[in-house]
Image (cartoon, rainbow, N blue to C red):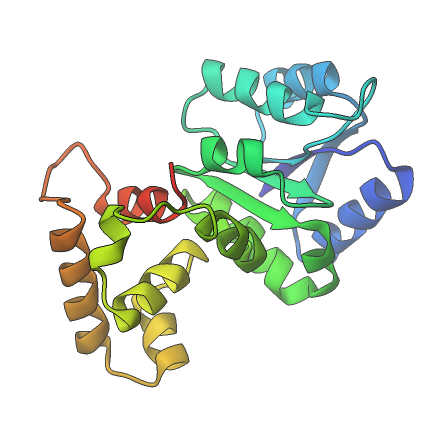
């Protein structure tokens, strides 16, 4: 796997490169600003970009805007966003296919971080649990999620973390069949009928995050 890193902190940038290298992942470019990210993706055509939300010059949303420019040119390009805090203004806009959103503190768990990198690069979605919690607090009364049972909410929360059915079953100590039944119930209550052009699992997570 070939990765581009966009992070203005030299220490974190070098640390990420070392962690990736130890996991057998090649960092083909490590840049410190948004325009350089766009250029690096165009030049190296990596498998994934790891992007800090806040970068120079204003340290507000430069990284995010650069990531969105990359996605405009390559809609399915995998991007893993790292942020010091939960950026509620942006998180909902980021969730979708081949996107991850993690708080930087999660990097300390190397195995979990590398698994998130691989999952997003493979087209999956990985959302930090803290992001899920904070976005859930914004849900309005009367929203479709109110029809879900407590267990269905638990299952959907784990789906939003990027967990597979097997992992959800293990976490909740139930069978995979039970998990599949709950997911079918979630799809039904959120009016997500089968459609070849839609990914119902991602759409359910988007609803959960208040998109």
Query: Which residue appears at 11% of the width and 37% of the height?
Result: 195
Quarter residue 194 falls in: top left
Residue 55 image point, x, y percent: 78, 26
Residue closer to the observer: 134 or 202: 134
Quarter residue 6 falls in: top right
Query: Which residue appears at 15% of the width and 44% of the height?
Result: 192
Location of residue 108 with respect to 71 vertically, above or below: below
**134 on left or right of 39:** left
**Does any portion of residue 64 appear in the rendered image?**
yes
Location of residue 81 with respect to 32 vertically, above or below: below
Quick one: which residue is furthest to the bottom in this view? 173
Residue 146 image point, x, y percent: 26, 56
**154 on left or right of 177:** right
Query: Which residue appears at 27% of the width and 53% of the height?
Result: 145
**34 on left or right of 193:** right
Q: Quadrant of the C terminus?
A: top left
Residue 31 image point, x, y percent: 78, 27
**Does any portion of residue 47 appear in the rendered image?**
no
Query: Which residue appears at 64% of the width and 17% of the height?
Result: 38
């Amino acid at each position: 796997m070939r990765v581009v890193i966009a992070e203005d902190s030299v220490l974190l940038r070098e640390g990420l490169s070392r962690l990736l290298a130890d996991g057998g992942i090649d960092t083909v470019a490590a840049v410190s600003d948004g325009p350089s990210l766009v250029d690096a993706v165009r030049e190296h055509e990596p498998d994934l970009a790891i992007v800090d939300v806040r970068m120079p010059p204003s340290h507000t949303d430069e990284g995010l805007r650069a990531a969105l420019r990359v996605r405009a040119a390559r809609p399915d390009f995998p991007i893993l966003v790292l942020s010091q805090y939960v950026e509620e203004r942006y998180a909902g806009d980021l969730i979708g296919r081949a996107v991850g959103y993690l708080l930087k503190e999660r990097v300390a768990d190397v195995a979990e971080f590398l698994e998130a990198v691989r999952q997003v690069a493979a087209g999956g979605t990985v959302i930090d649990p803290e992001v899920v919690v904070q976005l859930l607090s914004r849900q309005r009364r009367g929203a479709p999620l109110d029809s879900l049972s407590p267990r269905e909410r638990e299952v959907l929360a784990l789906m939003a973390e990027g967990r597979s059915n097997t992992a959800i079953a293990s976490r909740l100590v139930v069978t995979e069949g039970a998990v599949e039944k709950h997911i079918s119930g979630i799809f039904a209550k959120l009016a997500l009928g089968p459609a070849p052009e839609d990914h119902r699992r991602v759409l359910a997570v988007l609803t959960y995050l208040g998109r």
